[in-house]
Image (spheres, rainbow, N blue to C red):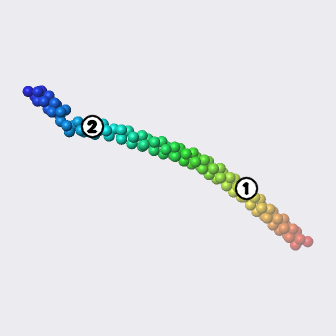
Amino acid sequence: ADRVQAIESSIRETSDPAPFSYLLARRQYLPVLHMRKNEVQSHLHEAESVVDTMRVKLFEQARETSTLEKLKQRQFEEYRKEAQQQEQKVIDELAVAGHFRKNLNKV
Protein backbone atom coordinates (compact mmCIF):
# COMPACT_ATOMS: atom_id res chain seq x y z
CA ALA A 1 0.00 0.00 0.00
CA ASP A 2 2.84 2.38 0.84
CA ARG A 3 4.53 1.55 -2.41
CA VAL A 4 1.36 2.24 -4.38
CA GLN A 5 0.98 5.60 -2.62
CA ALA A 6 4.58 6.48 -3.42
CA ILE A 7 4.07 5.65 -7.09
CA GLU A 8 0.83 7.66 -7.20
CA SER A 9 2.61 10.58 -5.55
CA SER A 10 5.43 10.34 -8.05
CA ILE A 11 2.95 10.34 -10.94
CA ARG A 12 1.21 13.41 -9.52
CA GLU A 13 4.52 15.25 -9.18
CA THR A 14 5.52 14.53 -12.77
CA SER A 15 2.12 15.52 -14.10
CA ASP A 16 2.04 18.68 -11.95
CA PRO A 17 2.58 21.73 -14.22
CA ALA A 18 4.61 23.59 -11.59
CA PRO A 19 7.69 21.34 -11.77
CA PHE A 20 7.50 21.37 -15.58
CA SER A 21 7.43 25.17 -15.70
CA TYR A 22 10.26 25.22 -13.16
CA LEU A 23 12.30 22.88 -15.35
CA LEU A 24 11.51 24.95 -18.43
CA ALA A 25 12.53 28.18 -16.71
CA ARG A 26 15.68 26.52 -15.45
CA ARG A 27 16.52 25.25 -18.92
CA GLN A 28 15.98 28.71 -20.40
CA TYR A 29 18.18 30.27 -17.70
CA LEU A 30 21.13 27.92 -18.32
CA PRO A 31 22.39 29.83 -21.39
CA VAL A 32 22.29 33.03 -19.35
CA LEU A 33 24.38 31.36 -16.67
CA HIS A 34 26.85 30.07 -19.26
CA MET A 35 27.13 33.53 -20.80
CA ARG A 36 27.69 35.07 -17.36
CA LYS A 37 30.31 32.42 -16.57
CA ASN A 38 32.13 33.25 -19.80
CA GLU A 39 32.03 36.97 -18.99
CA VAL A 40 33.41 36.35 -15.51
CA GLN A 41 36.16 34.13 -16.92
CA SER A 42 37.03 36.80 -19.46
CA HIS A 43 37.27 39.42 -16.71
CA LEU A 44 39.36 37.02 -14.66
CA HIS A 45 41.80 36.52 -17.55
CA GLU A 46 42.03 40.28 -18.05
CA ALA A 47 42.67 40.79 -14.33
CA GLU A 48 45.33 38.07 -14.32
CA SER A 49 46.99 39.74 -17.30
CA VAL A 50 47.01 43.07 -15.46
CA VAL A 51 48.43 41.39 -12.36
CA ASP A 52 51.17 39.74 -14.43
CA THR A 53 52.05 43.07 -16.06
CA MET A 54 52.15 44.83 -12.69
CA ARG A 55 54.25 42.01 -11.22
CA VAL A 56 56.83 42.49 -14.00
CA LYS A 57 56.83 46.26 -13.42
CA LEU A 58 57.22 45.73 -9.68
CA PHE A 59 60.16 43.39 -10.26
CA GLU A 60 61.80 45.93 -12.58
CA GLN A 61 61.26 48.74 -10.07
CA ALA A 62 62.65 46.61 -7.24
CA ARG A 63 65.72 45.82 -9.33
CA GLU A 64 66.18 49.50 -10.22
CA THR A 65 65.74 50.52 -6.59
CA SER A 66 68.32 47.95 -5.54
CA THR A 67 70.75 49.23 -8.16
CA LEU A 68 70.21 52.83 -7.05
CA GLU A 69 70.71 51.87 -3.40
CA LYS A 70 74.00 50.16 -4.26
CA LEU A 71 75.11 53.20 -6.26
CA LYS A 72 74.13 55.50 -3.39
CA GLN A 73 76.08 53.35 -0.93
CA ARG A 74 79.13 53.29 -3.23
CA GLN A 75 79.03 57.07 -3.67
CA PHE A 76 78.72 57.55 0.08
CA GLU A 77 81.72 55.30 0.67
CA GLU A 78 83.74 57.28 -1.89
CA TYR A 79 82.68 60.54 -0.23
CA ARG A 80 83.62 59.23 3.20
CA LYS A 81 86.99 57.99 1.94
CA GLU A 82 87.72 61.34 0.29
CA ALA A 83 86.64 63.23 3.43
CA GLN A 84 88.97 61.07 5.54
CA GLN A 85 91.83 61.74 3.13
CA GLN A 86 91.19 65.50 3.29
CA GLU A 87 90.98 65.34 7.06
CA GLN A 88 94.25 63.40 7.20
CA LYS A 89 95.94 66.01 4.97
CA VAL A 90 94.83 68.79 7.32
CA ILE A 91 96.06 66.84 10.35
CA ASP A 92 99.41 66.17 8.63
CA GLU A 93 99.79 69.84 7.67
CA LEU A 94 99.02 70.91 11.23
CA ALA A 95 101.52 68.41 12.58
CA VAL A 96 104.22 69.62 10.17
CA ALA A 97 103.44 73.27 10.91
CA GLY A 98 103.54 72.57 14.64
CA HIS A 99 106.84 70.77 14.29
CA PHE A 100 108.39 73.71 12.36
CA ARG A 101 107.06 76.25 14.89
CA LYS A 102 108.54 74.22 17.68
CA ASN A 103 111.92 74.06 15.92
CA LEU A 104 111.82 77.81 15.05
CA ASN A 105 111.23 78.71 18.68
CA LYS A 106 114.29 76.71 19.70
CA VAL A 107 116.52 78.63 17.35
- Image vertical order of residue 42 relative to residue 15, above or below: below
Q: Nearer the viewer, residue 78 or 7?
A: 7
- Image vertical order of residue 97 relative to residue 63, above or below: below
Asked if one can make out residue 66 in the rendered structure from this viewpoint, the answer is: no
Residue 76, given in percent of the width and then of the height, sits at 69, 57
Farthest left residue? 1
Q: How many numbered callouts?
A: 2
Disc on res. 24: 2
Residue at mark 1: 78
Which residue occupies 39% across, 42% down? 36
Which residue occupies 20% across, 39% down? 18
Alpha carbon separation for disc pair 2 and 1: 81 Å
Identified by mark 2, the residue type is Leu
Asked if one can make out residue 3 in the rendered structure from this viewpoint, the answer is: yes
Farthest right residue? 107
Which residue occupies 89% across, 71% down? 104
Q: Nearer the viewer, residue 78 or 100?
A: 78
Residue 5, given in percent of the width and then of the height, sits at 11, 30
